[in-house]
Amino acid sequence: MRLIRHDATGPALIEVGGSTVAVCQCGLSRNKPFCDGTHAKTRDEEPGKTYVYDADHNRVIVEDMFPTPGKKFVHKP
Ligand code: FES
């Protein structure tokens, strides 16, 4: 298991051969590197909070897991 930080809540749109390709930047797509629309689950994330998703893309933890420097870690089970 690894945790990888993703802050983007939508894809990068890249022009390839005259077509626009949406590349996942949120980390949740099941069709990487392409966006599959799952980033919609990130739309209500609040700045300053850390969100963790399980393999089924269910949000399982919402807490201040990675506080900004100088801010104390807060665990809220
Ligand atoms: S940006 Fe990740 S699924 Fe769309």
Image (cartoon, grey):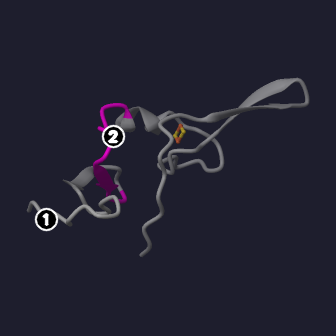
What amino acid type is highlighted by mark number 1?
His
* Image height of 29 relative to 39, above or below: below
Q: Is residue 38 left or right of residue 12?
A: left
Crowding at label 1, few (<14), some or many (≥20) Cα neighbours within 10 Å?
A: few
Q: Is residue 21 magenta?
A: no
In the picture of the structure, the residue carrying the numbered disc 1 is 75
Among numbered discs 1 and 2, the one appearing first in the sequence: 2
Q: Residue at x 51, y 51 (%)?
A: 27
Q: Residue at x 44, y 73 (%)?
A: 2
Whether pointer 1 and pointer 2 mark residues with C-beta atoms closer than 8 Å, the reply is: no
Q: Which residue is farthest front?
A: 70
* Image height of 31 relative to 75, above or below: above
> Looking at mark 2, is its residue's CB closer than 8 Å to ligand 1?
no
Q: Secondary structure at mark 2?
A: loop
Q: Is residue 73 left or right of residue 35?
A: left
* Residue 60 lies in quadrant: bottom left
Q: Is residue 12 left or right of residue 38?
A: right
What amino acid type is highlighted by mark number 2?
Pro
Crowding at label 2, few (<14), some or many (≥20) Cα neighbours within 10 Å?
A: few
> How far across and how far down the image is residue 23, in percent?
66, 40
Q: Which residue is farthest left?
A: 77
Q: Residue at x 34, y 53 (%)?
A: 56
> How far across and how far down the image is residue 55, in percent?
37, 59
Q: Which residues are magenta?
A: 43-55
Q: Is residue 54 magenta?
A: yes
* Residue 44 lies in quadrant: top left
Q: Main secondary structure of the magenta part?
A: loop
Which of the two residues, 72 or 65, is positioned nearer the viewer here? 72
> How far across and how far down the image is residue 1, in percent?
42, 75
Q: Residue at x 52, y 46 (%)?
A: 29
In the picture of the structure, the residue carrying the numbered disc 2 is 47
Q: CA distance from mark 1 to mark 2?
A: 17 Å
